[in-house]
Image (tube, rainbow, N blue to C red):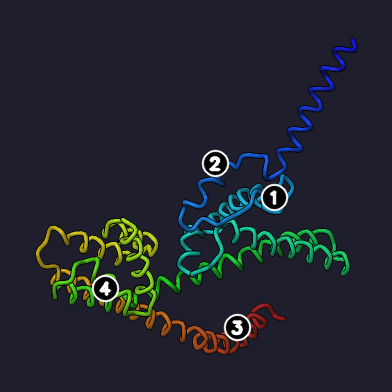
């Protein structure tokens, strides 16, 4: 019996010593991800975190919050990926960070609405609506702000695209290679297209082909004009002179932008008549109601 207890005590001491020594940096062997981290470009240097640290809690909560946020966004008609919108707006946050920010603001709104409802003494249905509606409203406001910034970036890219296409056409016609033309436009420009062309040049220097790097830009921009431009530039190794095709594409983009501007002007011109129509109809309805009420009174003998 004593031997059994001794063996059990030795096992317990061995497990305890292993757990204690594994928490010491000089004793444990680094994980594979920590050994590979210095050799990955752009990977943040992060120390190994504990079980109950803030980083471990973030790693557990972030996927759940991201999935719930994506489902709520699709429920309210936002189908664009958050990662693409964050890259377009130049935000330093990643998808998990943005969703955690949304969750924090929504949680604060939930707590504030609950406190206000309890202090004011609202009836139960109104309190429930306010408590549920406040975090949902905060979530949608943050989502809409990001979506509006993303759409503004796409609009700037579309407006800059005709000039950029013409510059590419002139450079290619004058003997520049496609990679050199992209690099020159990115280095000399200062707009949204020039910034993305600098990214494309960086990707080309890292070994990505020119067409693949341009297709990444087209996927990020999610514009039909960009897709057509990449399709034309993909013929660089097959066609002898792309100047005519690129000039035609620039004219097509200008016509598309012009049509959108005309539609916007017509829509705003129609919106101007809405208050005028309401202001005209309301007195007319009142003037028609007076004789109508008088005629009904006479017919009914009132």
Element class at badge 3: helix
- Point out residue 92 in the picture as x, y percentages from the top left corner: 54, 66
- Point out residue 34 in the picture as x, y percentages from the top left corner: 56, 47
| Residue 26, above or below 95 | above
Element class at badge 2: helix
Characterize the local packing of mark 4: few (<14), some (14-19) or many (20 or more) Cα atoms within 10 angstroms: many
Residue under label 4: 253
Q: Which mark, residue 292?
A: 3
- Point out residue 255 in the picture as x, y percentages from the top left corner: 25, 76
Element class at badge 1: helix
Check if mark 2's residue and mark 1's residue have beta carbons within 8 Å.
Answer: no
- Point out residue 228 in the picture as x, y percentages from the top left corner: 25, 63
Residue under label 1: 57
Tell me which label, 3 or 2, sits earlier in the chain: 2
Instruction: Tell us which disc is closer to us: 2 or 1.
Output: 2
Tell me which label, 1 or 3, sits earlier in the chain: 1
Q: CA distance from mark 4 to mark 1?
A: 48 Å
In the image, is 63 to the left or to the right of 12?
Answer: left
């Amino acid at each position: 019996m004593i031997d059994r207890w001794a063996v059990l005590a030795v096992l317990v001491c061995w497990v305890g010593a292993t757990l204690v020594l594994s928490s010491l940096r000089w004793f444990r062997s680094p994980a594979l991800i920590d050994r590979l981290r210095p050799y990955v470009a752009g990977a943040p240097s992060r120390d190994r975190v504990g079980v109950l640290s803030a980083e471990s809690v973030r790693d557990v909560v972030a996927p759940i919050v991201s999935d719930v946020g994506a489902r709520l966004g699709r429920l309210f008609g936002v189908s664009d990926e958050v990662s693409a919108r964050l890259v377009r707006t130049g935000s330093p946050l990643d998808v998990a960070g943005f969703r955690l920010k949304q969750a924090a603001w929504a949680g604060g709104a939930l707590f504030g609405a609950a406190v206000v409802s309890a202090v004011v003494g609202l009836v139960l249905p109104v309190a429930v609506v306010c408590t549920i509606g406040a975090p949902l409203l905060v979530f949608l406001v943050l989502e809409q702000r990001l979506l509006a910034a993303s759409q503004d970036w796409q609009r700037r890219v579309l407006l800059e695209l005709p000039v950029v296409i013409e510059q590419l056409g002139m450079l290619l016609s004058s003997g520049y290679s496609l990679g050199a033309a992209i690099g020159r436009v990115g280095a000399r420009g200062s707009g949204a297209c020039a910034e993305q062309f600098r990214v494309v040049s960086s990707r080309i220097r890292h070994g990505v082909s020119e067409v693949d790097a341009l297709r990444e830009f087209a996927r990020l921009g999610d514009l039909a004009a960009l897709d057509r431009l990449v399709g034309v530039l993909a013929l660089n190794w097959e066609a002898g002179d792309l100047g005519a095709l690129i000039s035609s594409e620039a004219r097509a983009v200008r016509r598309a932008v012009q049509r959108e501007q005309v539609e916007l002007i017509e829509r705003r011109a129609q919106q101007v008549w809405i208050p005028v129509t309401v202001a005209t109809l309301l007195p007319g309805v009142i003037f028609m109601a007076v004789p109508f009420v008088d005629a009904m009174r006479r017919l009914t003998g009132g």
